Image (cartoon, rainbow, N blue to C red):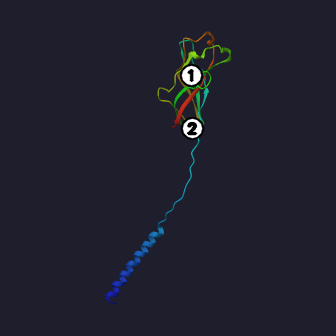
Amino acid sequence: MNRKRLVRLGVVAIVGLGIAAGAAYAAWTVNGSGTGTASAASAQGLTLTAGSASGVLYPGATADVDTSVGNTNPFPVHVSSIALDTTQGQNGFAVDAGHSGCNLGSLSFTTATNGGNGWDIAANSALDVDAASSITMGSGANDSCQGATFTVYLTATATSA
């Protein structure tokens, strides 16, 4: 074999090996595209139900308001505050039928925040909350308020935790 033919054969072999190597690499490279789906839960409102009253009210006194906060969501929530819901009752308060003469304007409620820490409630659970010293009966309460049971309408502000 002459030298020219040998060089040509070498070049053809190198080019052939390069093509084969590129084809082998390409055979292992696979790409694709497409879509997936996900869905978000719909947040459910918290439920607040009356707990057991602790302490008693009289003109000039404060007492705790106890409530249970229920979370039916599949995720935990952080309640930052519990406030008076003034859209219900008489500015957020109601009194039992036997004491309808009680002047509810003598009552006030201080928004509860648990010292600024709020409350954490696990998914699908409830937490008893004692809003310490949050209700006050002013000195203007009349005698019709003696022995009354009050309903305190509350609202909770919360975010997913």
CA gap between label 2 and label 1 equals 24 Å
* Quadrant in the rendering for residue 8: bottom left
Find out whether the residues at labels 2 and 1 contact each other: C-beta distance under 8 Å: no
Front residue of 18/41: it is 41
Residue at x-position 54% and y-position 27%:
82
Residue 98: percent from left, percent from top: 68, 15
Q: Name the amino acid, label 1.
A: Val
Residue at x-position 55% and y-position 39%:
75
Residue 141: percent from left, percent from top: 58, 12
Looking at the image, which residue sits at the far bottom?
A: 1
* Quadrant in the rendering for residue 21: bottom left
Categorize mark 2 by other alpha carbons within 10 Å: few (<14), some (14-19), many (20+): some
Q: Is residue 128 left or right of residue 100?
A: left
Q: Name the amino acid, label 2.
A: Ala
Categorize mark 1 by other alpha carbons within 10 Å: few (<14), some (14-19), many (20+): many
Secondary structure of the residue carrying numbered label 2: loop
The dot on residue 137 is none
Front residue of 141/60: it is 141
The dot on residue 65 is 1
Looking at the image, which residue sits at the far top?
A: 143
Residue at x-position 41% and y-position 78%:
16
The dot on residue 123 is 2
Residue 91: percent from left, percent from top: 59, 22
Residue 43: percent from left, percent from top: 58, 39
Residue at x-position 54% and y-position 24%:
131
Front residue of 88/125: it is 88
Which comes before the other along the chain, label 2 or label 1? 1
Looking at the image, which residue sits at the far left?
A: 3
Q: Is residue 58 above or below residue 153?
A: above
The label nearer to you, 2 versus 1, is: 1
Q: Is residue 42 above or below residue 46?
A: below
